[in-house]
Image: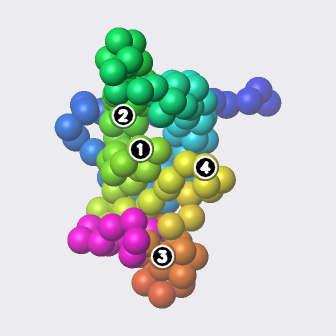
């Protein structure tokens, strides 16, 4: 048997996808890889920007570079059907709330409802034990 590579659905940018837990977990390694690469690309630009004085004539050029990297990352996340909530912070819509992930977390391990934010997220294991949601079994 050869190794099988998952093919991930690409969706229009303004159309977040609804994920089952299995689907979210299958696309997660790609999300993490893309995010980690963007993070490492952005870090030296961020450090350069932080060190610049506002009057520096190169400031706008570095700001554009920063913006280009972030926009490219956002576009990739949205094309995978995720909801971008902040820099390196994405949600996978489950149909009744969000599986929530923030780089550099190593796994998809949190959940929050639609009307709650990052601060209200709970460990996924707790949510599954308490609510036994449909998206876990699909």
Q: Nearer the viewer, mark 1 or mark 3?
A: 1
Disc 4 target residue: 104
Q: Secondary structure at mark 4?
A: loop
In this figure, which residue is indicated by the disc labeled 3?
122
- Which residue is pictured at 79% across the width and 30% down the height? 1
| Farthest residue, direction right | 1
* Front residue of this view, candidates 42 and 74: 42
Magenta-highlighted residues: 111-120
**Element at badge 2?**
helix
Disc 1/disc 4 C-alpha distance (Å): 11 Å
Residue 74, numbered circle = 2
* Residue in the image at 48% along x and 87% along y: 130
34 drawn magenta: no
**Labelled disc at residue 87:** 1
Residue 66 image point, x, y percent: 41, 25
- SS at circle 3: strand
Rendered residue at 49%/55% (across/down): 101
User: Mark 2 to mark 4: distance in Å?
Assistant: 16 Å
Q: Decide: few, some or many residues near mark 3? Use Cα within 10 Å; few <14, some 14-19, many ≥20.
A: some
Label 2 neighbour load within 10 Å: few <14, some 14-19, many 20+: many
Residue at left offset 54%, top offset 81%: 126
């Amino acid at each position: 048997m050869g190794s099988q590579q998952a093919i991930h659905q690409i969706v229009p940018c303004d159309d977040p996808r609804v994920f089952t837990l299995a689907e979210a977990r299958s696309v997660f390694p790609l999300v993490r890889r893309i995010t980690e690469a963007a993070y490492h690309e952005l870090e030296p630009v961020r450090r350069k920007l932080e060190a610049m004085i506002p009057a520096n004539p190169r400031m706008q050029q570095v700001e554009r570079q920063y913006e280009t990297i972030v926009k490219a990352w956002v576009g990739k996340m949205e094309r995978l059907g995720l909801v971008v909530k902040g820099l390196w912070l994405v949600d996978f819509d489950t149909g009744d709330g969000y599986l929530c992930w923030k780089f550099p977390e190593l796994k998809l391990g949190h959940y929050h409802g639609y009307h709650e934010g990052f601060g209200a997220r709970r460990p996924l294991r707790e949510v599954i034990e308490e609510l036994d949601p449909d998206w876990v079994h699909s």
